[in-house]
Image (cartoon, helix red, strand yellow):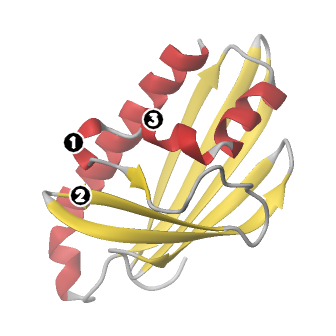
Amino acid sequence: MGFGEHLLTSQTFVPRARAEVFAFFANAENLEAITPPELRFEIATPVPIRIGEGTRIEYRLRLFGVPFTWASLISEWDEGSAFVDEQVRGPYAFWVHQHAFFDAPGGTRVEDRVRYRLPLFPLGELAHPLVRRQLGRIFDYRATRLRELLG
């Protein structure tokens, strides 16, 4: 990892077939259903969106009450197994989110690996404990919603 870079990892088990779980993630409209309501997440790109390598998606949301636009690029796409989205515009100096899907007994293991860097280094690092806690809450909410929607 690079200087000032942080890593967030998360794993969630879903009792559904990998193809079905991947299809859920391949539908950008499902992102709203797994994002905490206080973020007021909405897709700005016209839907439906066909996701694949090279797809760019824009969102509007609020973080700590501050509205902003986030644009991501799907930089890798391995149908049924994994994909990577990278922030091309948003609040982070760097954000790369790897999503991987694995067959597991009775379902699918969803693994997330997010490498990120805060803006305004080194001053921005002062906010990292708060940001880390907020990201943890967001990914905990996401895991809970995945189990509710696909469990």
Classify mark 2: helix, strand or loop: strand
Give the Cα distance between marks 3 and 1. Answer: 12 Å
Q: Residue at x 69, y 29 (%)?
A: 109
Give the number of the disc on residue 47.
none
Task: Look at the image and tell me in which quarter the N terminus lies.
Answer: bottom right
> Which residue was labeled with disc 3?
34
Q: Residues within 10 Å of mark 1 (few under 14, many from 20)?
A: few
> Which residue was labeled with disc 2?
62
Classify mark 1: helix, strand or loop: helix
Q: Residue at x 26, y 48 (%)?
A: 39
For this rendering, which residue is in front, 123 or 45?
45
Q: Residue at x 62, y 23 (%)?
A: 13
Give the Cα distance between marks 3 and 2. Answer: 15 Å
Horizontal arrangement in the rendering, residue 138 relative to residue 18 (left or right): left
Sequence order check: which comes first, mark 1 or mark 2? 1
Contact (CB < 8 A) between labels 1 and 2? yes
Q: Residue at x 73, y 25 (%)?
A: 108
Q: Amino acid at mark 2?
A: Arg
Horizontal arrangement in the rendering, residue 62 relative to residue 55 (left or right): left
Sequence order check: which comes first, mark 3 or mark 2? 3
Quadrant of the image occupied by residue 17 = top right
For this rendering, which residue is in front, 46 or 105?
46
Q: Amino acid at mark 3?
A: Ile
Classify mark 3: helix, strand or loop: helix
> Which residue was labeled with disc 1?
38
Q: Residues within 10 Å of mark 2 (few under 14, many from 20)?
A: some
